[in-house]
Image (tube, rainbow, N blue to C red):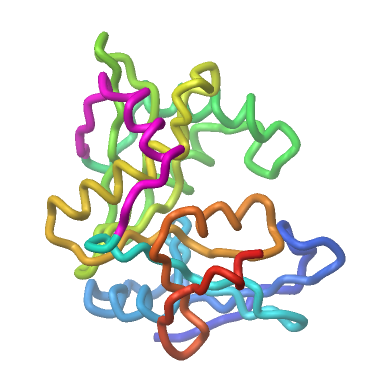
Amino acid sequence: MFYRHTEDSNCGYLPNLQSNSIFIDPDSEPSLDQLNLLHLQGFRRSGKLVYRPQCPECNACHSSRIINADFRASKNQKKAIKRNLDIRLRWVEAEFNEEHYQLYQHYIAQRHQNGEMFPASRDQYKGFLIEGHGTHKFLELRDSENSLIGCCVVDIFYDGLSAIYSYFDPEQAKRSLGRFIVLALISQGQEMGLPYTYLGYWIKNSSKMNYKADYQPLEVFDGETWRKLISNETK
């Protein structure tokens, strides 16, 4: 496999810093074994792009994973589960679906109006969430009336489920759907006998990314090995 580097750009998570990533040549088609190995080395996927941050000024981005067998829900997490007892989970293939797209478009319009993903066109949606390397499926969340209220795009690896992106009905804030989706993934992984649930990059000083430390025990990749995140590192 050939690796390339992105050009430096402003970091989207930490102010006054530049970001850079190493990524797999888009013209290559990595095998499932290669994708699993890259995943264990801290690489993530966005569409067909397989990448890992390699920034010139810091190393704040750490791949993170929950140890499924040892996970115990906190008080707030248990409340989120109780609020969503009516939800039915269903795995579906990663194919374009107008119902999915409409929910995604609504979510982006309400939550990320100032971001690069707005407005959410069909082409942008397909390139970001439908395209890939055959490792992903969609986990649907449907209420008692069978309405789609949430969805998580998930890579399924040998050792765990890896959350790529989640979106949900922003009008249903009382449900805490973002939190519930993570809990649903942990539960699904446990049922499948998988040891880990991967949540993407944990960034201590980013309000967008440090929530992952709420799910314990959490391991992070330090560039060489996976290690448990200790409590004083999250403060």
Q: Position of residue 141 (x, y in %)?
A: 31, 28
Would you say residue 85 sits in the magenta stretch? yes
Q: Residue at x 68, y 51 (%)?
A: 207
Q: Nearer the viewer, residue 220 or 25?
A: 220
Taking depth in this image into account, of 20 and 5 the one nearest to the observer is 20
Does residue 98 appear anywhere in the picture? no
Residue lying at 42% horizontally and 40% vertically, measured from the top left = 75
Q: Position of residue 46 (x, y in %)?
A: 47, 57
Name the residue: 59% across, 74% down.
Answer: 53
Report x, y in % for residue 128: 48, 48
Q: Is residue 89 left or right of residue 128?
A: left
Residue found farthest to the bottom:
224
Q: Is residue 17 magenta?
A: no
How far across and down, in percent of the image, does residue 94 sit?
Answer: 28, 43
Quadrant in the picture for the C terminus: bottom right
Report the span colored magenta. Answer: 71-92
In this view, the residue in front, 166 or 7, is: 166
Q: Is residue 228 above or below residue 151?
A: below
| Res. 1 image quadrant | bottom left
Quarter of the image for residue 62 reads bottom right
Residue 180 in sight here: yes
Of residues 83 and 199, the one drawn nearer to the viewer in this rendering: 83
Can you name the residue that lies furthest to the front here? 75
Residue extending farthest top: 145
Residue 194's quadrant in the figure?
Answer: bottom left
Number of numbered discs overlaid on the protein picture: 0
